[in-house]
Amino acid sequence: MSAASQLSTISTRPSFPPASQAIGAFARPSQPRDDLAALQSIGTRLRVRRGETIFNEGDAAEYSYRLVSGSVRLCRHRANGRRQIARFLFPGDLFALADLSEHSFTAEAVSDVVLIAYRQRQIAQLSDENPAIRHYFVKQLSRKASEMQHHLMVLGRQTAKERVASFLLALCDRIGSEEDGVIDVLMSRRDMADYLGLTLETVSRSISELKRERLIQAITSRNIKLLDIESLRALADGDEEI
Amino acid sequence: MSAASQLSTISTRPSFPPASQAIGAFARPSQPRDDLAALQSIGTRLRVRRGETIFNEGDAAEYSYRLVSGSVRLCRHRANGRRQIARFLFPGDLFALADLSEHSFTAEAVSDVVLIAYRQRQIAQLSDENPAIRHYFVKQLSRKASEMQHHLMVLGRQTAKERVASFLLALCDRIGSEEDGVIDVLMSRRDMADYLGLTLETVSRSISELKRERLIQAITSRNIKLLDIESLRALADGDEEI
DNA sequence: CGCCGTGTTGACCAGTTTCAAGATTGGTGG
DNA sequence: CCACCAATCTTGAAACTGGTCAACACGGCG
């Protein structure tokens, strides 16, 4: 079923994205140091098309992954059709790193993606042998936990408009183009809604409101420019009155 | 300010709680094996009273902790007074394990608690030297991630009554007395509300509804018996019609 | 040009919050 | 042991946010 079964054996040496500091839900991953190069030689390159499933919740966790290009969503589906997206992943992110016996979520391609799959046995072995890699992994897990706590605050205590503002800011911090604050929104309104615990209509309405308030500007619906990042941050932080 | 500054140097050999299997937000921690006894000799016993702060978000992370008795809440406070509780901890739980440089949340005592503080340097050293301890830690982090994903689903996609049902079931799995499903609710309605992303009034109303539907029975407001666990689970799982 | 997937907008409605008043509970001191 | 006080919990009524259902707009592509 899942795309993981298409694993080819073409080994690659992917390039890491440029380093950067950012806080928020989608902070860029810290960079592995040179002595972590070992990771780069054991992976298998994999291509997955938009909308396809990489693995399902409950599947045996044979591989961990690093995303090279595009975006992936990690989500849980319920019998009644409700879906919650726990994370969006961007180039450089590792995932399914701590899924011990089986995957605890479903991974689906938001856009066409390229990723590297690492056998978990090899990951574990590398981790046992190499303290630097081990500490790099711990750092990733630590960052992930911090992101998820931020996400809990968003879902538990923010209004619709605040959630959307938080999301756009996090996207901008992570994949926004330098200086001008223009972001390529790879995910649909429904994806955003399922990440933010809203309906797609409410997401759309919140975006329209932000446009009317001149805090953002939409070139197209998937290409948004943040006009007033200060006010957006004040909004996302829930400050009373801007 | 924080109670961590009261660290005494009385070393202890705490007993681990009995083993058990449970799923849900508050699953019991997996048991360290005998060869993890090393952990038990390096900690410092600490007593904190109800309502007191153990450490604040942003504090330098000198220690990791294991809870011996009582309950602790991990939360984030915002300028506007909004609070989100990310986890409740129960006896046997480790916390602040992956806080690398500074704590990413505030820890407060829900009830009078006893805990063991471990210097992070010692934790790191133990982890580097001892693969069994390392794997135990990874397992804890993995379980925590799974719990948090469940929590995200609750906050993002469940109604008030479903959230309260999920919470009571998780409490029961974790600290409910054997067989009869009676739980000692250590936390206030406000704590529950801040965990579930609701107001305390809505929590109270949801509990009243569950009582009216004979799914639960309240001996006192802090002592609740689950009468129909099957129906509660159906409700928490969001099944259409019971 | 028309179709289909996606996004936007409107009107109405349900669930949750807010504000406010009581009821319980637990602790303290007479 | 009881009375009182403070904190916590419950309940009610009104307001509001976000959800639902439905129509329409837009944009890419055959």
Image: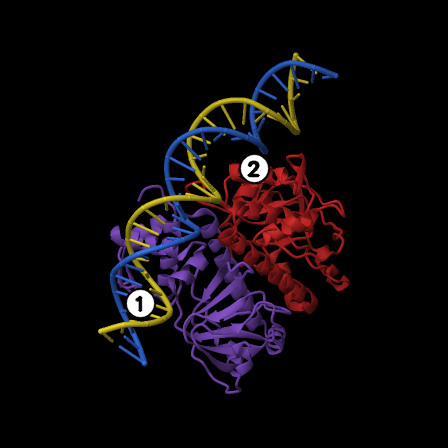
Chain colours: A purple, B red, C yellow, D blue
Q: Residues within 10 Å of mark 2 (few under 14, many from 20)?
A: some
The kind of residue on which mark 2 rests is Ser
Q: Quadrant of the N terminus of chain A?
A: bottom right
Q: Which residue is mark 1?
A: A177
**Looking at the image, which is closer to me, B29 or B215?**
B215
Quarter of the rendering containing residue C27:
top right
Rendered position, A181 above or below B184: below
Q: CA distance from mark 2 to mark 1?
A: 47 Å
Which chain is mark 1 on?
A
**Looking at the image, which is closer to me, A50 or B77?**
A50
Which chain is mark 2 on?
B
Which residue sits at x=64%, y=39%? B111
Q: Quadrant of the C terminus of chain A?
A: top left
Rendered position, B190 above or below B12: above
Residue A172 position, x and y percent, is: 35, 62
Quarter of the rendering containing residue B2:
top right
**Looking at the image, which is closer to me, B76 or C18?**
C18
Residue A123 position, x and y percent, is: 59, 75
The kind of residue on which mark 1 rests is Ser
Q: Secondary structure at mark 2?
A: helix
Q: Is residue A88 visible?
A: yes
Q: Which residue is mark 2?
A: B204
Which residue sits at x=40%, y=70%? A19
**Mark 2–mark 1 contact, CB under 8 Å?**
no
Q: Nearer the viewer, mark 2 or mark 1?
A: 2
Quarter of the rendering containing residue B48:
top right
